[in-house]
Amino acid sequence: MPMIRLTVQAGVLTDERRATVQRDLARVLLRWEGAPDTAFFRAQAWSYLTELPEGAQVTAEDDAPRFLVEVTVPNGALSERRRTGLVEDATKTVLAAAGLSPTEAPRVWVLVHEQPDDTWGAGGSLIRHANLVALAKGQADA
């Protein structure tokens, strides 16, 4: 199942935006993965927020905050078109949460990690992409 993690320096996001950005990113991920909008799939889209202490992230140029979005999905879950849309929407979501303009987009990096079949487990079993597709199709048809 998909996971998304936003890493940011502590204090960059307001309390209100901290409370919403994780669910917003999870929704972006599910939409681009093509999962049905069901309680089951929403519950499987795990979203993490990792806040680094002040000074833990810098560049060789400056100390302006940067944002790292890491996405983990089953291999084959995202076509190039879907990866492109995911990166664009995740970037927009993070910029909005941080109160930044689109010109600040280079400060947001999105890394998509595709997990091969038989290397991801949940509930005591290995997860295979084909099983997830069948489950999604069944829920979408219901």
Image (cartoon, rainbow, N blue to C red):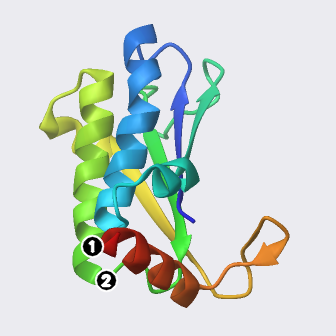
Instruction: Tell me the residue at 45%/86% (across/down).
Output: 76
Answer yes or no: is residue 7 visible: yes
Q: Amino acid at mark 1?
A: Arg
The front one of 43 and 117 is 43
Who's the residue at 27% across and 33% down the image? Answer: 95
The picture places residue 113, in percent across and down from the top left corner, at 54, 70
Element type at mark 1: helix
Q: Position of residue 8 (x, y in %)?
A: 51, 31
Instruction: Please tell me which residue lies in front, 113 or 61.
Output: 113
Residue 68 is left or right of residue 51, and the answer is left
Q: Nearer the viewer, residue 130 or 26?
A: 130
Total numbered circles:
2
Task: Determine the residue positioned at 42% across, 77% down.
Answer: 138
Q: Quadrant of the N terminus?
A: bottom right
- Residue lying furthest right in this view? 124
Q: Residue at x 30, y 64 (%)?
A: 32
Q: Report which quarter residue 53 is drawn in.
A: top right
What is the x, y in percent for residue 71? 50, 59
Residue 87 position, x and y percent, is: 30, 59
Q: Is residue 7 left or right of residue 64?
A: right
- Residue 79's label in the rendered image is 2
Using the image, determine if residue 59 lies above or below residue 14.
below
Mark 2: amino acid: Ser
Report if the CB atoms under discs 2 and 1 are less than 8 Å apart: yes
